[in-house]
Image (spheres, rainbow, N blue to C red):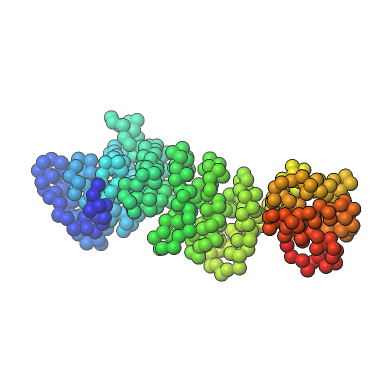
Amino acid sequence: MTIENAELTTEQVLRRDIPWETYMTTKLISGTDLQLLRRYDKMAESYKSQLLDNDGPAYIHVFVTTLRDVFKEETVEYVLALIDEMLTANPRRARLFHDSSLSNEDTYEPFLRFLWKGNWFIQEKSCKILSLIASARPNVQNFVDANGDASSSKRTLTTMENVLNGLVDWLCAQLRKPSHPSCSIPSAINCLATLLKEPVVRRSFVQADGVKLLVPLISPASTQQSIQLLYETCLCIWLLSYYEPAIEYLATSRALPRLIEVVKGSTKEKVVRVVILTLRNLLARGSFGAQMVDLDVLQIVQSLKAQAWSDEDLLDALNQLEGGLKANIKKLSSYDKYKQEVLLGSLDWSPMHKDPLFWKENITCFEENGFQILRVLMTILDTSNDARTLAVACYDLSQFIQCHPAGRVIVVDLKAKERVMKLLNHGTAEVTKNALLCIQRLFLGAKYASFLQA
């Protein structure tokens, strides 16, 4: 493939003069084909439109047989450009390819073949045309026989299942190893954003290990072109968020942190909308809810809600996401989960530690078994070598002092003061900061604790 072919446009190709008479003389097209082509080629858009309205399937037949029988590259490009022009003017014309009069024609085969054998112009136009044909098929239920009843035909026709699988294979190949340095990936993503509406394509795409090819493309964008690519990539992820096997893959990838980075940095409403709709879909699936809480998605959602959005779907999704995240935080902030974390002896800044509601609702639970959990926290202060664990333990003690009516007295009785004082000389800032907070609350008592900020 030369760059010259890659940069061709439909308009440039349609300026060519094709020697249709020569093709008839050499029996590559019939006399009827020639008449139809002469009547159509180089005519005004309005006149072409009239011809297609009156005799559309006949023109589809001519275009497909020409692509099947003529191998000259310039002519193949020209016929693809005619079809591209026709479908761009009115995408609903793709239905003509499914007309019953063409049921014994192998309508899809040339386009499928050109995906792998043509230059970039031929590949890209074939992909676009096939995608539109697939989307326009009349009976999604019986897509296997959408190109005619193969069982009654003397030869095996290319089925719509062949088309969709062939398209997915080619699109994944473009994402893995682009034919064109700047056009392959945007073209592939653009097609996928349409095709992944089909359940059969989602299945085929996941089986082809295509999901992992999308994840690196989820990254903040600045130029108009890259914003469109990002939007269409996120649209693909949203469509896949309705398909369980794809969700399972997304859960093990970096998709979620990447989506969150995008939504934090994007001002484009359509990008924000599709990411929020995706997060809403994923919230209740597997561990996504817990991950979103850890990644502070609630704060991001509340920040987005404060902005002026015109899209009702986006506003509804933000409200649903906020409600779902709050419910998740409540669930994640249960005392049982906290107790389990403390008993394991490894603490981290999981949501419950800094959630005022958790301490308010669960403070009396700390009295269970003779203040067992507080005693375990003392042991952690004595034995742990992990700076994060020590910092969180100090913070939790300071929260207990602040929230329990007798917190200060109980913690002093348990000899916490001496243990925490030692940590004031710890080499890690996070530990000393939280040890100091704990000591301040011990000395000042709950009355003044509200003036101290962690």
Q: Quadrant of residue 104?
A: top left
**In the rendered view, does 190 fall on the left or right side of 44?**
right
Instruction: Pick whichever, 55 or 397, lies toward us.
Output: 397
**Up-down relation of residue 136 to residue 104 (above or below):** below
Instruction: Pick whichever, 439 or 334, lies toward us.
Output: 439
Q: Horizontal and vertical percent for residue 445? A: 85, 63
**In the rendered view, does 350 fall on the left or right side of 81?**
right
Query: What quarter of the picture does the C terminus occupy?
Result: bottom right
Q: Horizontal and vertical percent for residue 68? A: 23, 41
Q: Quadrant of residue 201?
A: top left
Instruction: Pick whichever, 434 or 273, lies toward us.
Output: 434
Q: Quadrant of residue 102?
A: top left
Residue at 40 percent of width and 63 percent of height: 224
**Up-down relation of residue 243 to residue 435 (above or below):** above
Q: Horizontal and vertical percent for residue 136? A: 38, 48
Residue at 28 percent of width and 30 percent of height: 154
Residue at 23 percent of width and 49 percent of height: 2
Instruction: Pick whichever, 161 or 245, lies toward us.
Output: 245
Q: Horizontal and vertical percent for residue 450? A: 79, 66
Q: Is residue 406 visible?
A: yes
Q: How many marks?
A: 0
Residue at 83 percent of width and 54 percent of height: 418
**Up-down relation of residue 447 to residue 2 (above or below):** below
Q: Is residue 365 visible?
A: no
**In the rendered view, does 416 fall on the left or right side of 426?**
right
**In the rendered view, does 43 fall on the left or right side of 424?**
left
